[in-house]
Amino acid sequence: MRYISTRADAPQLDFEGVTLAGLASDGGLYLPEEWPSFSGFEIQQMSGLTYVELAVRVMTPFVEGSLSESELHDLCEKAYGRFAHRAVTPLVQLDHQHHLLELFHGPTLAFKDVALQLLGGLFEHFLSKTDDHLTIVGATSGDTGSAAIDGVAGRERIDIFMLHPEGRVSEVQRRQMTTVHADNVHNIAIKGSFDDAQAMVKRMFVDPDMTGDYRIGAVNSINWARLMAQVVYYFAAALQLGAPSRKVAFSVPTGNFGDVFAGYVAAKMGLPIERLIVATNVNDIIHRALSTGDYSAGDVTPTQSPSMDIQVSSNFERLLFDLGGRDGAAIAAQMRGFEAERSMHLTNAQREGASALFASERVDEDATAEAMAWAKAECGEVLDPHTAIGLAAARKAGVGPGIPVVTLATAHPAKFPDAVEAATGIRPELPERVGDLFEREERYTALPGDYEAVRDFIREHATRSA
Ligand SMILES: *Cc1c(COP(=O)(O)O)cnc(C)c1O
């Protein structure tokens, strides 16, 4: 499979190349040159497969030329063997129409584990072939950092430097990063906000002092391999509910638009999806873009669903590219306009294409708490605030009565105990597998919010590329 950049001005790469590159050199994002697709019969043949078997079936076309089927199978077994539930992503029924897809049974309690456990293995596999070394630099407001660290801790040929804004991540989230004691894990607390940390990381990808000496890798959802791994659970859920003979709708708590874009890919591959409901909190740039065509960024408002507190959703560019006839030059111009003005309008083709599959809902803080209270009172389920936004949107969206609606449960409620307790009166306990989190010693380096200080620290501790 060949991959092309949304901005049409970067080399085409194979799967191995896009996995190690992350961002394309023209600033665009990589996508497969064409969507592989399955017939109804082929989808029917997938029912009854284990999660690992299904993952291999769904991902094989994307890795063709870079991994054999048995290599992919081994990597999936290792990644999903670490989940605490045998079904990996079990489905839970709430009422006659609504279901939850629990994506939080991995080591760090959020859906990011599904992709990052696999990505860690993919990095190691590809690097061992060339004996090269990867320096992962990332910024996190919470869940990506811990999932990425767990995915690569102790792996050879990889160092990870994870920047978090000092004092601005929850204690559970910070401890999930700072209590991992592998030699290749480097936590950096910087003075400033998440946006400051993110800006430093982006600068590092284009700093010749860094790119000349190090092979810099990405773990956020600009990396295609992450989205690819997430396509699998859309198939898993739909098959449980009667696909391909029955259509299914999904409601997806959305920030960077990665998870819901994986649902779009599943639809492109032939999975009969009735609707993808994009659920946002009050940071609603995507809801405004889909409902009015106006894509303009404001300031971030902190909420009880911090992993969705985002203004610029990187993966939206992938959708705009695919809906606009895959015209890379036009997308490059559109995105340059957005970067200059912090605002742009969708074209008619983009709006019409999106409205054929997507719906969107904005869920405010009160409605989030109400959804948590409703699920507890009516279904006996304790939800985290991100999942609650998905469920509130699912109930609001008015999907036809015969169609099952699956809300993606993106985090375990114990990651956000204060918000859950305020809404339901219940303080969720951390599962046993992370039980001694509060006893383990924390290790991190505090640095000023200054690019040179961070760069010098990384240069001191990273291994140069071959
Ligand atoms: C990252 C995250 C999201 C948002 O997912 P995107 O792929 O960025 O849209 C939602 N909920 C939780 C708990 C997350 O960690």
Image (cartoon, rainbow, N blue to C red):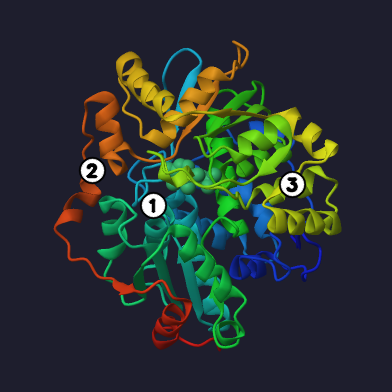
Q: Residues within 10 Å of mark 2 (few under 14, many from 20)?
A: some
- Rendered view: 335 above or below 84: below
Q: In front here: 186 or 127?
A: 186
Element type at mark 2: loop
| Left or right side of 120 for 44 | right
Residue behind mark 2: 430
| Left or right side of 464 for 338 | right
Question: In the rendering, at what x and y percent does residue 154 appear?
Answer: 35, 72
The N terminus, quarter of image: bottom right
Q: In front here: 421 or 83?
A: 421
How far separated are the C-alphas under marks 1 and 3?
44 Å
Residue 81, numbered label: 1
Q: Kindly identify the residue that appears in the image at 80 percent across and 32 percent down.
A: 352
Question: Could you tell me the amino acid type at mark 3?
Answer: Met
How far separated are the C-alphas under marks 1 and 2?
20 Å
Of the two numbered discs 3 and 2 on the same chain, state the one appearing first in sequence: 3
Of the two numbered discs 1 and 2 on the same chain, state the one appearing first in sequence: 1
| Left or right side of 242 for 346 | right
- Dividing the picture into quadrants, the one containing residue 436 is bottom left
Of the two numbered discs 1 and 3 on the same chain, state the one appearing first in sequence: 1
Question: In the rendering, at what x and y percent does residue 403 appear?
Answer: 60, 17
